[in-house]
Image (spheres, rainbow, N blue to C red):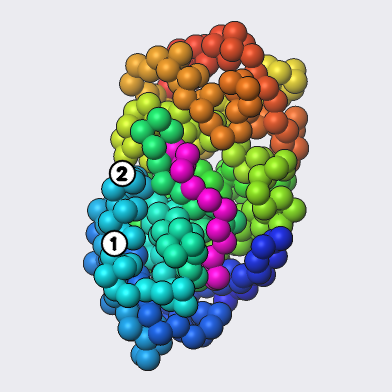
Amino acid sequence: MHKQLITTSTNQYNVFVGNGIIENLADYLPKEYQNIMIITDSIVHELYTEDVRKYLPQSAQVSVSVVPAGENSKSIEQYYHLLTEAIKNNLDRKSLIVALGGGVIGDLAGFVAATYMRGIDFVQVPTTILAHDSSVGGKVAINHPEGKNLIGNFYPPQAVIFDTDTLKTLPNIEKRSGYAEVIKHGFISNEAFLEDVLETDITTDIPPMKLNDHLQKGIAVKADIVEKDEKEANIRKFLNFGHTLGHAIESELGYGNITHGEAVAIGMLFAIEVSEATYRISLPYQAYYHWLSANQYPLSLPPLSVQNLINRMKKDKKSENAMVQMVLLKEVGSPVTETISDQDLTNLLDNFLGKLGSE
């Protein structure tokens, strides 16, 4: 079992990563709780809720609230429903919410915890690779039809308990989604990590030691940035590499029609192309494209309006004065933010979408 302490300006919490550690769940809670509500989705509920309930403190009153699986549950309707469930289950300011699931559940349950009675404790119990990124750092949110994660808060968990045994049940689509964030951490941190991921075949069973190593390295990259910039005033924006276009694609296609990671994977491909054009440099574009292709990422999209995508990119949280800001790379491990003019963005995006999937 690997333990990492995350220290920010508002909180300290441990991230535990290991095989089978869910059996010691009660030991990883930071204090005693008399009332606990598990929030999970319809798929994870069938797989893991009973185990989690069994390993929570026997003295606690435990309730379970289940939402439909998928990005559509990060909605105002499900958020309000869960607040009602918390009231019905008599949660108070000393109660605990357990976010059991992937990134959607972590974001949704965390936002419920952040706003219920002005904030109660919650812990993350991730069950997807993607959640190695989303469960760390304290960003919690729900979506708006006009944009992803536009309604949210910075609200760190009390602990993250990541039992990697739960990843054995992941379908390939979820592996792809999660590994997009893993390779993102490689792009923004160092070449050795990136090359190791580029050599990994995620269409087969990833060796547990390699998977755990990638997850721990990804968490370490994110932790280092979050500790320096919890509220995204400057360098935390680097964690959004690929997300400006990725979020726009998700919103434009409709939440759930492409996974978050698959959209971000395409967004990173575009960010690399923009970086090469902006700084007149060469980055591992082809190596990354071939990795995406070999691992069955979608590399073609339905016809999309360039103007609609740009309008959505302008609603991104990094945008300033209705100008699109993108995270680019001057080299692997050297991310920067740049403002891209509408004309340049239109030309670059039109060219990129035109050749996407044909390389």
Residue labelled with disc 2 = 72
Of the numbered discs in the image, which one, if any, rests on residue 84? 1
Q: Is residue 168 above or below residue 329?
A: below
Q: Is residue 201 above or below residue 114?
A: above
Residue found 40% across the figure and 84% down from its top? 34
Q: Nearer the viewer, mark 2 or mark 1?
A: 1
* 158 part of magenta stretch: yes
Residue 50 visible within the image: yes
Q: Camera-side residue: 77 or 13?
A: 77
Task: Report the magenta residues as a range.
Answer: 148-160
* 248 part of magenta stretch: no
Question: Circle 1: is it few (<14), some (14-19), or many (20+) Cα within 10 Å?
Answer: few
Q: Camera-side residue: 310 or 266?
A: 310
Left or right position of 326 against 307: right
- Secondary structure of the residue carrying tag 2 is helix
Magenta: main secondary structure:
strand
The image shows residue 255 at horizontal and vertical percentages of 34, 37
Left or right position of 358 against 192: left
Q: Amino acid at mark 1?
A: Thr
The N terminus, quarter of image: bottom right
The image shows residue 198 at horizontal and vertical percentages of 58, 43
Residue found 65% across the figure and 66% down from its top? 11
> Which image quadrant for residue 235?
top right
> Which image quadrant for residue 20?
bottom left
